[in-house]
Image (cartoon, grey):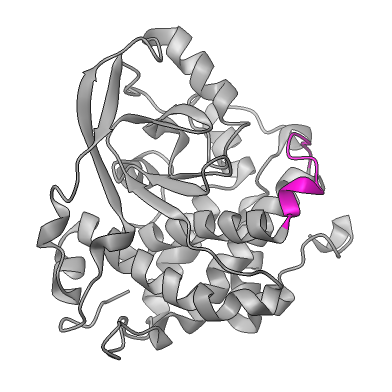
């Protein structure tokens, strides 16, 4: 998806963390992987620790670096050229979309935190690595994005490469923030697994919310009234659908060697694509995955 080159970006809603001093917060090697796998149940992301090789679990923490690298993110042209600026741009677009759309799902909207990091980082949900992918932490109402995950999405999970694949992932995590504000996490069993589990329904609803954003993304504007994004082409939408398919439980488990539906936590590739398309075509009003029977998921 392409940003209008003269649209102005607002970096105030995005933090960036750089590598800091060594710490014993998380161990390296297999112990680190076990900790990360445990934490995957505390926040909402895609745990790839069983699949991704060379995960960075060394004993390094991160400190917030105010503005470092993001001061270069001024316009849509910067977002088209640089991935971190693209993250600023999609944050701007999602913030604008949900400012208006939140009323339709019955919440008084508050923007989530948005943190860019490298390798691993700490959050109110614990310390996580890039093997978990971008994730949302309800404990501090923030999403965490390591942009190196997008390389894993294409190189190891087979998603098509393109900006809209990256934006889909972020829009999905933003959907978890909306669910948090809706009280979804308080009324469901987030540790439940299986093809019709609450866990799967939560993830599919977030996919639907991501599709809803995409359906309206070309209408979001910057503070000076300039449209931020150009309408997506069919090819670009296909890239987003490819990303949704790549993070299906059956696809990821198939990469690991065996598919076990009773352990599903996010939904199949087909389900993730279908609910994304539902949101894209019908909007947030069609995203109640908890109201449908298992056969309709």
- Does residue 135 appear in this view? yes
Residue occupying image coordinates x 10% and y 61%: 72
- Residue extending furthest toward the right: 293
The spot of residue 174 in percent (x, y) is 51, 59
- Does residue 162 appear in this view? no
Residue occupying image coordinates x 58% and y 44%: 138
Quadrant showing the N terminus: bottom left
Residue occupying image coordinates x 42% and y 52%: 113
Residue 192 drawn in magenta: yes
The spot of residue 16 in percent (x, y) is 25, 45
Give the camera-side residue of 283 and 59: 59
Give the camera-side residue of 295 and 58: 58
Horizontal side of 18 relative to 46 (left or right) equals: left
The spot of residue 240 in percent (x, y) is 45, 65
Q: How many marks?
A: 0
Residue 109 drawn in magenta: no
Give the camera-side residue of 214 and 224: 224
Quadrant showing the C terminus: bottom right
Quarter residue 24 falls in: top left
- Relative to 273, say whether 156 is above or below: above
- Relative to 239, say whether 118 is above or below: above
- Relative to 168, say whether 190 is above or below: above
Q: Which residues are magenta?
A: 183-194
The spot of residue 154 in percent (x, y) is 35, 47
- Relative to 159, say whether 226 is above or below: below
């Amino acid at each position: 998806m392409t940003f209008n080159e003269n649209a102005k970006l607002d970096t105030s809603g995005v933090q960036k963390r750089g590598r800091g001093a060594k710490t014993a917060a998380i161990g390296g090697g297999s112990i680190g992987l076990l900790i990360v796998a445990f934490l995957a149940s505390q926040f909402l992301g895609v745990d790839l620790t069983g699949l991704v090789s060379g995960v960075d679990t060394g004993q390094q923490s991160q400190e917030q670096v105010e503005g470092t690298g993001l001061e270069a993110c001024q316009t849509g042209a910067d977002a088209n050229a640089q991935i971190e600026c693209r993250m600023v741009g999609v944050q701007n677009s999602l913030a604008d979309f949900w400012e208006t759309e939140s009323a339709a799902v019955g919440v008084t909207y508050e923007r989530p935190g948005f943190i860019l990091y490298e390798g691993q980082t700490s959050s109110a949900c614990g310390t996580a690595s890039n093997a978990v992918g971008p994730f949302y932490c309800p404990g501090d109402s923030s999403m965490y994005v390591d942009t190196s995950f997008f390389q894993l999405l294409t190189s190891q999970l087979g998603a098509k490469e393109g900006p809209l694949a990256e934006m889909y992932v972020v829009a999905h995590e933003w959907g978890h923030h909306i669910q948090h504000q809706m009280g979804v996490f308080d009324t469901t069993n987030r540790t439940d697994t299986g093809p019709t589990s609450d866990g799967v329904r939560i993830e599919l609803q977030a996919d639907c919310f991501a599709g809803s954003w995409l359906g309206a993304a070309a209408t979001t504007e910057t503070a000076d009234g300039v449209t931020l994004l150009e309408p997506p082409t069919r090819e670009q939408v296909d890239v987003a659908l490819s990303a949704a398919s790549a993070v299906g439980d059956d696809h990821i488990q198939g990469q690991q060697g065996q598919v076990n539906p009773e352990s599903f936590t996010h939904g199949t590739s087909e389900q993730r694509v279908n609910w994304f398309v539902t949101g894209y075509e019908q909007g947030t009003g069609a995203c109640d995955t908890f109201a449908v029977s298992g056969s309709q998921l």
